[in-house]
Amino acid sequence: MSTPRLLEVIALKKHFPLYGGLLGQTTGYVYACDGVSFGIDKGETLSLVGESGCGKSTVGKAILRLYPITDGEVWLDGKRIDNLPGPQLRPMRRRVQVVFQDPFSSLNPRQRVRDIIAEPIINFGLAKGSELDDRIAELMDKVRLPRDAMRQFPHEFSGGQRQRICIARALAPGSDLIICDEAVSALDVSVKAQIINLLSDLQDELGLALLFISHDLAIVEHLTHRVAVMYLGKIVELADRRTLFTSPHHPYTRALLSAVPVPDPTVKRQRIILHGDVPSPINPPPGCRFHTRCPFAFDRCRSEEPILRPAPNSPAHGHVTACHLDVVPDTAEVAKAA
Ligand code: SF4
């Protein structure tokens, strides 16, 4: 029997009801996440990328069971967790932790750093007394904060340092998977790089798996093993990092990549400007959801929804794409057509 993946998400859906009318009846749904599937292995980083509102944070919160899912399954280490009642969820909550975008609002301003980090350790009954103190000191070392800083309050730190505290808290119960929900988006460029390096080092040291949710492809390139690109509640392409960054198939992925700055002033990248707004997730377009903005849309795209399939002509194992096109247009052609 093969070893189960650390996390397996199968056809996950989260539809938020809209209420209206005099009686407050359901008048429609926001199709925030609409059939998303992927897996993450131990020690692996999978990045979920896409524009704001594409549903990537909804996926993270649904995995964490911050709200009930509409349909689909979530498995952790071979055990289904999406339908577990509250008390049986505790072991999962110990193993899957989260780091949110805004470290200030996710830390209790009245608690000292020591108490913030101690809380999950105490809640899960993992240590007390001197063992607890040793564990906190060790976590401060791991996130490269001075040990004496544990007596301070969150407002006494910079944004990057506060995010280190959040990471220490996420590591505290001995987690296997950390969901980083735009965890570096609010930080300055140099601080972003430091936090990315820290996460990467912690992953090597502890064998952590990361689900890295970001709108910024330039950031994920330095950290991730695989990338899943989301558009309007669906994954449109998934591949290992190298394949996605060098041989993307889907026109949307190509457009996103064309916006990533190249750190070489002599290289000019052909930018693909997508026209039109992202359609509303309340009323997604029929067929391919990207067809209203895709420079290559043809009749079939407007009526038949493309399903994820192995990317044509891609030798990379696990490279899948949801596009009817077999022949990949090159970036210059996409830019011209857009
Ligand atoms: Fe564009 Fe059609 Fe492919 Fe969708 S299926 S990305 S509309 S070519």
Image (tube, grey):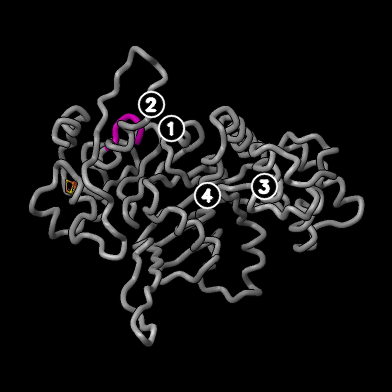
Q: Label 4's element?
A: strand
Whichever of labels 4 and 2 marks the residue nearer the N terminus, that label is 4
List x then y, in percent, for residue 74: 48, 64
List x then y, in percent, for residue 336: 15, 30
Whole-angstrom CA distance, mark 4 to mark 2, is 22 Å
Q: Label 3's element?
A: helix
The answer to if 313 sits in the magenta stretch is no
Q: Which mark is residue 166?
A: 3
> Which span is picked out in magenta?
244-248
- The residue that appears at 19% across and 36% down in the rendered structure is 328
Inspect this view and state whether residue 3 appears: no
Q: Is 133 placed above or below 23 here?
A: above
Inspect this view and state whether residue 18 appears: yes
> CB atoms at circles 2 and 1 under 8 Å apart?
yes
- The residue that appears at 76% across and 53% down in the rendered structure is 116
Q: Amino acid at mark 1?
A: Ala
Pick whichever, 152 or 195, lies toward us.
152
Q: Residues within 10 Å of mark 4 (few under 14, many from 20)?
A: many
Whole-angstrom CA distance, mark 3 to mark 2, is 29 Å
Residue designated by label 2? 261
Relative placement, left or right, of 268 versus 173 is left
Residue designated by label 4? 181
Q: Which mark is residue 218?
A: 1
- The residue that appears at 38% across and 22% down in the rendered structure is 262
Q: Amino acid at mark 4?
A: Asp
Relative placement, left or right, of 177 versus 219 is right
Whole-angstrom CA distance, mark 3 to mark 1, is 23 Å
